[in-house]
């Protein structure tokens, strides 16, 4: 198990509300190795985002086990899970979720401050990663002053600034045009390769999925290899 950054075994996720019952995930098994790039494709509503939330410890499975960096996430307390997530995982979403009142630099530094880094060291690390994603001249700009592509690159910098073992990305360029999407993905893949950070990417982009080490399809609650 220590060979895998992320691992899940027989993960089931059910949703029930009143008389309504939905079995979204049906016994998912998945192993992610260090530095591995994995794409997950599937139709809308197939459970891709649900799976990503479970892998990141943002929700609990109905059955099964999820391990991140050697610890079973669904057995940790909420507080312990948050600490472990901050230390080992990074997240990028379709919507950047940057805090609008803070600059790009402040947004990217926040995960380091949460971890306990000093303000000075947090700022230095944030500037370095923002420079790597091409935002060296935009660090003092707030999200409203950045383009869509710049906001997503800032979100990628925030996900990578803590040097996580694995980044979970959910349609991170779904709101961007094709050219900007390509630029953002190139930055993400370059940083993935530089830092040997694992990448689990949910996407509708088949061409991008083909560039990953592995492509998996999630349909009817079942995950299969392509």
Image (spheres, rainbow, N blue to C red):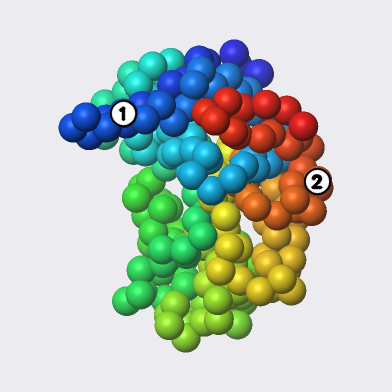
The foreground one among 92 and 1 is 92
> Can I make out residue 80 in this image?
no
Q: x%, y% of residue 174?
A: 58, 63
Which quarter of the figure has residue 179?
bottom right
Residue at coordinates 60% horizontally, 82% vertically from top-left? Answer: 137
Residue at coordinates 55% horizontally, 81% vertically from top-left? Answer: 147
The foreground one among 107 and 74 is 74
Residue at label 2? 210
Outermost bottom residue:
145
Secondary structure of the residue carrying numbered label 1: strand
> Can I make out residue 42 in this image?
yes
Which quarter of the figure has residue 61?
top left
The foreground one among 19 and 210 is 19
User: Closer to us: mark 2 or mark 1?
Assistant: 1
**Would you say 209 lies left or right of 162 here?**
right
Residue at coordinates 75% horizontally, 61% vertically from top-left? Answer: 186
**Vertical side of 149 occupied by 199: above or below:** above
Q: x%, y% of residue 138?
A: 55, 81
Q: Are marks 2 and 1 in contact (CB under 8 Å)?
A: no
Residue at label 1? 21
Residue at coordinates 38% horizontally, 46% vertically from top-left? Answer: 115
Q: x%, y% of residue 111?
A: 41, 53
Q: Residues within 10 Å of mark 2 (few under 14, many from 20)?
A: few
The image quadrant where one finds the C terminus is top right
Which quarter of the figure has residue 84?
top left
The foreground one among 69 and 200 is 200
């Amino acid at each position: 198990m220590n060979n895998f950054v992320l691992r899940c075994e027989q993960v089931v996720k059910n949703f029930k509300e009143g008389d309504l019952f939905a079995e979204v995930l049906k016994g998912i098994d998945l192993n992610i190795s260090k530095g591995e790039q994995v794409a997950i494709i599937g139709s809308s509503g197939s459970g891709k985002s649900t799976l990503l939330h479970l892998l990141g410890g943002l929700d609990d499975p109905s059955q099964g086990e999820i391990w991140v960096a050697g610890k079973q996430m669904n057995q940790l307390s909420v507080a312990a899970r948050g600490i472990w997530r901050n230390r080992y995982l990074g997240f990028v979403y379709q919507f950047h979720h940057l805090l609008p009142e803070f600059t790009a630099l402040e947004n990217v530094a926040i995960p380091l401050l949460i971890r306990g880094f000093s303000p000075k060291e947090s700022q230095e690390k944030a500037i370095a990663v923002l420079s790597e994603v091409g935002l060296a001249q935009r660090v003092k700009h707030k999200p409203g002053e950045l383009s869509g592509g710049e906001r997503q690159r800032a979100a990628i910098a925030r996900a990578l600034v803590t040097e996580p073992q694995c980044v979970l990305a959910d349609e991170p360029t779904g709101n961007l045009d094709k050219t900007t999407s390509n630029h953002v993905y190139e930055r993400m893949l370059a940083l993935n390769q530089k830092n040997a950070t694992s990448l689990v990417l949910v996407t509708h982009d088949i061409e991008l999925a083909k560039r990953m080490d592995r492509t998996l399809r999630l349909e009817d609650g079942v995950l299969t290899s392509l």
